[in-house]
Image (spheres, rainbow, N blue to C red):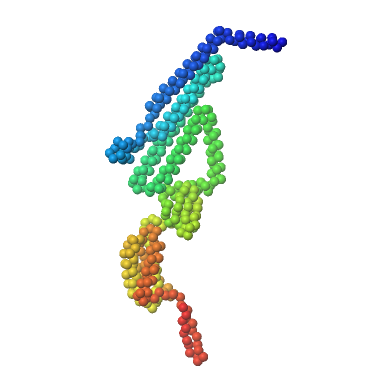
Amino acid sequence: MLKEQWQLIISGIWDRFTPERIQTLLTDLIASAVVLAATYLIIKILSHILDRTLKETNHQPDIVSRPGGTAPPEDESDGQQRPISDNFIRSARAFLKTLLFYGGYFIAGIIILEIFNFKIISADDLKSLGARLLKIIGVFLGAKLTINLGQLAIKQIFANRIKDNFMENRRAQTLEVLLRSVLTYIIFFLAGLMILEIFSVNTSAILASAGILGLAIGFGAQNLVKDIISGFFILFEDQFNVGDFVETAGVVGTVEEIGLRTCKIREWTGQLHVIPNGEITRVTNYNRGQMMAVVTVGIAYEEDIDQALEVLRQECASAASDMDAILDMPQVQGVTDLAESSVNIRTIAPTIAGEQWAVERELRRRFKYALERAGIEIPYPKRVLYQRNAEGHQLTITQD
């Protein structure tokens, strides 16, 4: 019984390997080899065409060719800015070559399966798939080109504004990076929706769901949205910069970092405050324009006011010549208050921004020594006691 089964199997195998079948198999194998060879040659030729067509034009400057081995100036080596950058050309070339390689061998595999009478995909389905792939490639390349053009326009706008001193360099760079990122995300989001439309996906429902989700997130993260919007206007309106000495949200200190959500301010005693931008409603900036050092000095009622004014004027002239932080001659404005135990005289001096406190400290030191040299008393609190002796006479005892 077993012998008969083996004979049936062997006879079936011999029936399949008839000369006609062997000839057909060899013909199919030769045709498959021809398809693979043709695919390889076509891929090589098209890759060479892509390398010649999509070639960078912004090469590195030849250092040796210039006298002294120096590189050419930036404007000579870079040339004019082009809407299609070398990075975009390299990315597009690599993408097309990858697509050509896998797509070519995929089509070759389908043809070989057709040669061996294996039906994987019909001609109509293959045509539809190819059309969709071409549309996706077009959307991708169009999105990249649009992003490059938009980023170039943003860069040019901010470059012109910096050149015209319309805004400072740090703020312009921050806003430029922000706008370029927003542009990139928007374009890629729209490109993703177009690709979904190519595959017959209902993007209207996706947009509606995204709108509802965004609304819910907006209600749940009102403070976050408020901080980001406030941070954008802080940067756009140039309310303060890194390094400025400001007073805001109950904090006085030097700005160390400005972000879209928070600002970091360090007090002069070392504490670092991280303040959400939504809490910054009023800013006092001590670094915009020249500042004013204000010093008030009190003298005793018994002293000569005119002499004290002259002493202070002379000391102001000496301080103006010695201190670079004082921008103009300090002014002794005169008597500003008849206080309980002193006659107060005010002096002002225009200073460099941020140096007003140091100037005030130095002027107080100088005024104190100058008044002492002139014999003019600076009053301080005193206590007077009245007592009577045994005979009834009044004695006055003064205690400091």
Residue 313 x, y percent position in the rendering? 33, 69
Question: Quadrant of the image for the N terminus?
Answer: top right
Residue 122 x, y percent position in the rendering? 53, 18
Residue ID at (44%, 27%): 97
Furthest residue toward bottom: 391
Furthest residue toward top: 19
Q: Is residue 75 visible?
A: no
Q: Nearer the viewer, residue 260 or 37?
A: 37
Residue ID at (37%, 62%): 292
Q: Nearer the viewer, residue 391 or 107?
A: 107
Furthest residue toward right: 1
Furthest residue toward left: 67
Q: Is residue 273 visible?
A: yes
Please tell me whether residue 92 is drawn above or below residue 291 in the rendered image: above
Please tell me whether residue 209 is drawn above or below residue 168 in the rendered image: above
Residue 387 x, y percent position in the rendering? 50, 85
Judge from the rendering whether residue 22 lies leftward or rightward of residue 326; answer left or right. right
Looking at the rendered structure, the number of numbered marks drawn on it comes to 0
Residue ID at (54%, 17%): 113
State which quadrant residue 375 falls in.
bottom left
Please tell me whether residue 115 is drawn above or below residue 157 in the rendered image: above
Residue ID at (38%, 26%): 52
State which quadrant residue 288 falls in.
bottom left
Residue 144 x, y percent position in the rendering? 43, 33
